[in-house]
Image: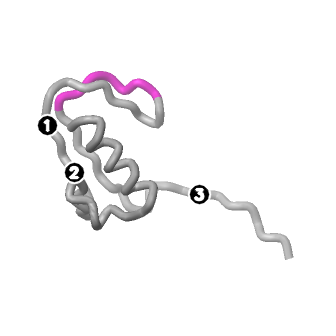
Amino acid sequence: MNLSELNSIIASIAKSDIENNPLIVPVQSPWFEFDGESIAWTLDGEYGGDVMHAKIQVVEQQLKVVLPKEEE
């Protein structure tokens, strides 16, 4: 990837126009698994160590959100 391609990807995401960018392949899956060279990883913005293998998985109904009551 070069800087021009990165700018193209960022612009497409900012404009919500990912369908028309050949550099972006939209997919849906309950999990993704990556293998590669060692890279620094973050967990909620905190350093999570260097990893060579990562599995990102959706865990349904595990995020609890508390919203304020609506005023009438």
Element under disc 2: strand
Q: Which residue corresponds to the image point at 20% horizontal and 58% vertical from the top-left?
A: 22
Q: Which residue corresponds to the image point at 38% horizontal and 48% vertical from the top-left?
A: 10
Farthest-out residue, left: 36
Confirm whether residue 29 shows in the render.
Answer: no
- Say the numbered circle drawn on residue 65: 3
Farthest-out residue, front: 4
Q: Quadrant of the N terminus?
A: top left
Q: Earlier in the sequence, mark 3 or mark 1?
A: 1
In this picture, which residue range is highlighted in magenta? 46-52
Residue 18, given in percent of the width and then of the height, sits at: 32, 62
Farthest-out residue, bottom: 72
Nearer to the camera, 43 or 14:
14
Nearer to the camera, 62 or 25:
25
- Say the numbered circle drawn on residue 32: 2
- Say the numbered circle drawn on residue 35: 1
Q: Do the residues labelled 3 and 1 touch (CB within 8 Å)?
A: no
Amino acid type at image mark 2: Phe
Residue 23, given in percent of the width and then of the height, sits at: 22, 53
